[in-house]
Amino acid sequence: MTIVAARPARLPLGLVVGLASLAWVAGWLVNLPLADWLAHDALGLERGTHLGDAVAFFLYDVPKVLLLLTGIVTIVSFLRSFVSPERVRRTLAGRGVLPGTVAAAGFGIVTPFCSCSAVPLFIGFVEAGVPLGVTFAFLVSSPMVNEVALVLLWGLFGPGIALAYMAAGLVVAVGAGLVIGRLGLERYVEDDVWTIRAGAGIGETRPTMDERLRDAWRSTVDIVRRVWPFVVAGIAVGALIHGFVPTDLVVSIGGRDNPFAVPALVVLGVPLYSNAAGTIPIVEALIGKGLPLGSALAFMMAVTALSIPELVILRRVMKPRLLAAFVAVVAAGILAVGYGFNLLLT
């Protein structure tokens, strides 16, 4: 008589998803007070000091970014399983280069994605046969301009600045997409992305809900495992800048009298990680201290569209030459926006 060991009962998928969601929300809610307690109570660092602010920033930002990375990549990977590659191809690739690029940049404004979702979105667009330039227009506009940022800008600075920022973000995204598309850099996409694309068209099976969720989680674990050390290193650099670089120094560097103010602020913004909405309070403080609007917007765009965590994540799907071209084209667009606004509002 053969005795077969009973398999441990598997929890219902809905219960697992619910518990995971509650754990994510709980982690998000306790992150700020926990980081504050660790920095100032457990470690005894004084509030308002350079070291205290830097450590508090690091302890808060690391869990925040990893929570965002885990949550958003899982959601995007799951939602991507419902998007038909043929539908995306018809919507974007079928419009022609210029209309498709403009449509992709506009689509980026109304999506809730940030740079954390870059890898699954990039792979999804490549799977759908969307041209590389059109894909880049979306990758630039989605983290840089979104409805939350526009509402906050409208409330803090009025409709003129909000609409001007939206227009500038669209111009940068469309310009970046058109330039990247013209350069013919498809061969610098990582080889495994094309392998995924080749395999995507084999069979039109409809996965079950269980399969969609499990595939999304496997994709998330793979991405987080690859990039988390580099993300932590980037945040450490950002914490040093946050704690030890005074706002007055930023204003003096970014003032109208300095012809290199805009590129200096762009370089300063790259190590910092945030979405557009999280950067707006910093921009408000800098403008209140006399920083020109163009310089402030360039800083904001650099933080949201050229942050180190995003570039680390994008390296997963791009070879160094393509990533360098992306940085160069987007940075040129941001510099043009910064100098342009400063010139027009002198």
Image (spheres, grey):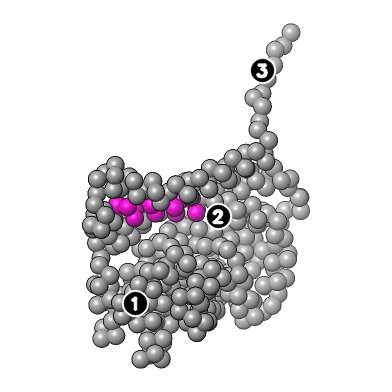
- Judging depth in this view, the residue of 96 and 187 nearest the camera is 96
Q: How many marks?
A: 3
Which quadrant of the rendered structure holds the N terminus?
A: top right
x then y, percent, for residue 251: 28, 76
Q: Nearer the viewer, mark 2 or mark 1?
A: 1
Residue 6 falls left or right of residue 292: right
Residue 145 seen in this snapshot: no
Q: Amino acid at mark 3?
A: Ala
The residue that disc 2 covers is: 72
Q: Is residue 343 left or right of residue 81?
A: left
Q: Residues within 10 Å of mark 2 (few under 14, many from 20)?
A: many
The three-letter code of the residue at mark 2 reads: Ile
Q: Mark 2–mark 1 contact, CB under 8 Å? A: no
Magenta range is 54-68
SS of the residue at dot 3? loop
Mark nearer the N terminus (3 vs 2): 3
The residue that label 3 is drawn on is 5
Q: Residue at x 25, y 67 (%)?
A: 246
Across and down, in percent, residue 197 comes to: 64, 58
According to the picture, the residue beneath numbered tag 1 turns out to be 288
Q: Real-space Cα distance between discs 2 and 1? A: 33 Å
Q: Earlier in the sequence, mark 1 or mark 3?
A: 3
